[in-house]
Image (spheres, rainbow, N blue to C red):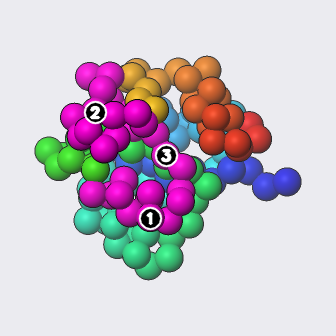
Amino acid sequence: MSAPRILVIEDDGLQAMTLEDLLEDIGCEVAASFGAMTQATAWLQAGGQADAALLDVNVDGEPVYPFADLLVARRMPFCFTSGYGHVTERRFENALVLGKPLSRQMLLTALRGFGLSV
């Protein structure tokens, strides 16, 4: 069985590296990692594939919600990450939000909730 491939959207370089390391430590592969919405959107529209995504709510001052809408349309599971612990868009008020800083256990719980084997 292959490792789950996870898309990471995080604009803070240190947090992105820490998250990528945590994902690899629990047996995942980072499918792609972006710190800007334009890059992430281009990757997805070019056929980028992942088993799930971790989305920072605010990416370099830009809300991630339009990108989340694209993932919903593609039926790709995702959760938000936020230092504030919540989302501001009503359509995502029931989405899973992981508070920062993220821990190994938080990631394991979220990914297993998506039905991924980690």
Residue density around tag 2, few if under 14, some if 14–19, many if 20 or more, within 10 Å: many
Disc 2 is placed on an element classified as loop
Residue identified by numbered label 2: 87
Q: Residue at x 44, y 64 (%)?
A: 73
- Callout 1 amino acid: Ala
Give yes or no for residue 28 being in the magenta stretch. Answer: no
In this view, 96 is above or below 106: below
Residue ID for mark 3: 78
| Residue wearing tag 1 | 73
Tell me the magenta residue range. Answer: 66-95
- Left or right of residue 69, residue 7 in this image: right
CB atoms of marks 3 and 1 within 8 Å: no
Mark 3 or 1 closer to N-term? Answer: 1
Judged by depth in the image, the label closer to the viewer, 3 or 1, is 1
Q: Residue furthest right?
A: 1
- Tell me the SS state at disc 3: strand
Q: Where is residue 9 shown, x and y percent of the image?
A: 38, 48
Q: Is residue 72 magenta?
A: yes
Location of the C terminus (image quadrant): top right
Where does the image place residue 99, in percent across and percent down from the top left? Answer: 39, 22
Amino acid type indicated by mark 3 = Phe
Q: Image quadrant of residue 55?
A: top left
Q: Residue at x 43, y 27 (%)?
A: 98
The image quadrant where one finds the N terminus is bottom right
